[in-house]
Image (spheres, rainbow, N blue to C red):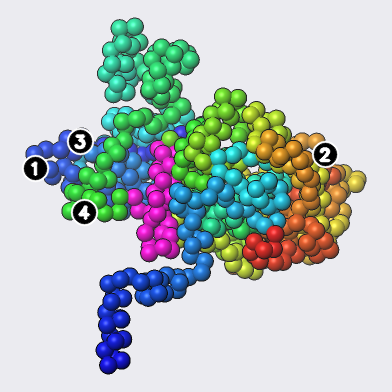
Amino acid sequence: MELERLVVVWCPELQQEGPRGEEARRFVQVVVRAGELCPWVHPVRLGVCALPARGPARFFGGEEMVVPLLVEAVGEDAHVGVADGLFAAILAARSRLIVPAGDVCQFLAPWSVATLARPDLAVTLQRLGVTTLGQFAALPPPHVSDRFGADAAACHKVARGESGELVGLRDRSIERRLRVARGEDPDLGVEPPPYQPGFFGGASAADTRAALSFARVQERLGIEAVLLGRIQGGRDPAEQAALVPWGSPEAAAATTGGVPPWPGRLPPPSPTLVLRVPRQAEVVDDTGRAIGVSGRGLLNSEPARLSVEGGPWQPITAWAGPWPVTERWWSVRRRRARVQVVTADGVARLLCTERAQWWIEALYD
Amino acid sequence: MSDGNSFWIEYEHMFAFSPQTGPARRSRELPVGLADRVRPTTPVAGRLLPVPPSLAVLFPDRALRRGTTTTVAGLPGHGATTLALALLAAASQAGSWCAAVGLPDPGVVAAAELGIDLRRVVFVPHPGSGWAEATGDLLPGVDVVLVRPPGRARQTAARHLSARARERQTALVVLVDHVNEWPEGGDLALSVGAIAWEGVGRGHGHLQGRRAEVRVSGRRSAGRALECSLWLPAGSGVVAATTQSEDEPAGAGSGDGPEAA
């Protein structure tokens, strides 16, 4: 599974709370200032906060641009690093590194097994002659879980770069501690529910149970793993809806369900599988000539066969369209057309053509 | 004198909590649908979760039973996803939390058209190799979990998840290509067979409805191997029985309530 790419801000001075307790207050400022620059900053433990790297990297033009901006914005003595998964990202921040995507195993290999924060396991491993994470990762997984148990197996997954989350890596009480530092009531709004049921505006026991289970999945798979659907305007099946992370401010505005009318959208039923990455396809007529759409929005011949990504040719039994889509006619003119195609096996697909190339956009499964 | 009497009667009733006065009258004024809306979120709820009226015929209890595993099988493109998502529609509208694990690119608009309350359904589209663990995490928290395993599930994972669903009284819906990809075999197995799209010709019309043969079998089907014909979906995007609107797949009258079933 692909690990979430994270930026970690690590402030060595703020890791221990001193007698005056000002570290927590300064860390609140760190989180706030980082949050003004990039969205989705979440505290991991005192002195450490993390944020997804993908969005800011795209916005600022690369991860190497984001890091100095963050260091400047935070205003403390902060180390910033980028890597796949939380564990590697924290280590990267400690040494102020940007670990390229996919290189997490090579990066972790020279670190000591003590970085896993499991003293018993580290001592045992070192007595066995296994001192680095690379040596630990080289052990076969079944042997590790047989010999050392489930917790060590989780550590092993981290060492192999298959997981970024480790029990104890995140301080579960950090939100509460920061609320205290901000001078708020620590017991108010423990978990802001994304949806307030109608009964006197309170969250029911079922909502709390659901929120706990979603948080557990987020801890396992990353913040962006648990999503809520939201309907918005648009013509494309992909534009009409968005998936937003559960618990985010956008998710609070999730719609009830009705689909608003929008000019240019295809009539219902809508496709149940909307491909994020469209698949290439070829559509030809009886003579094997490629089908195209003319300037008047008509097909130049009758489609007879369809092939998906160079796969076998399937006979087309029915089709509808083309529906021309002219978007952003005021700037770059994109001329596209959509066709619904049913093949002999009964499968219906939504195809799109642009510049003589056919794409499969969605499936009616 | 009569005024004095009525005053004393009122005064007595103030302390006697007689059923004829105040509180009883007020409780009768509560909104009619409130009891139905509140029920699924309470732990003492019945052991049944509602399904859309047109799908009730598929279930021996005419509803999804908590703690059971239902498999929905169908070749890709044959409407199994539509059927599985439709099973979440009525439950989510009634206020139950639902989750869909492993549906890679869910069509949110189609889900809304099927009647799903999007505020009540979370999607975990890319759990990767952690699909069984993620499903196990969600089973205690929500009322219905829809899971699509990536290929044939391991026997241990399947048995573990079914047992956890039974223990936590959650309805587990498993979406697979073939029935035998879920080694345990569901308490109830729905499989989509022959399908035919309507409304589309050679270059005219548009996709309006898919007629599909759905077969019911499994341990809890009470020995009856039922086969029925459904619109998966009908013209408005909802699931409907073909007998109701044989010649017009517009799918009207979907929200008529339970008496339409």
**CA gap, disc 3 and disc 4:** 23 Å
Image height of A298 relative to A142, above or below: below
Q: How would you rate the neighbour count of disc 2 (Cα within 10 Å): few for under 14, some for 14-19, many for 20 or more?
A: some
Q: Earlier in the sequence, mark 2 or mark 3?
A: 3
Front of the two marks 4 and 1? 4
**Parent chain of label 4:** A
Cα separation, mark 4 vs mark 1, equals 19 Å
Give percent across and percent down for residue A230: 52, 57
Give the amino acid at mark 2. Trp
* Marked residue nearer the N-terminal end (1 or 2): 1
Real-space Cα separation, disc 2 to disc 3, in angstroms: 62 Å
Q: CA distance from mark 2 to mark 4?
A: 65 Å
Q: Which residues are magenta?
A: A191-219
The mark nearer the N terminus, 3 or 1, is: 3
Which x, y percent locates residue B228?
78, 49
Label 1 in the same subunit as label 2: yes
Up-down: is B7 above or below A144?
Answer: below
Q: Amino acid at mark 1?
A: Arg
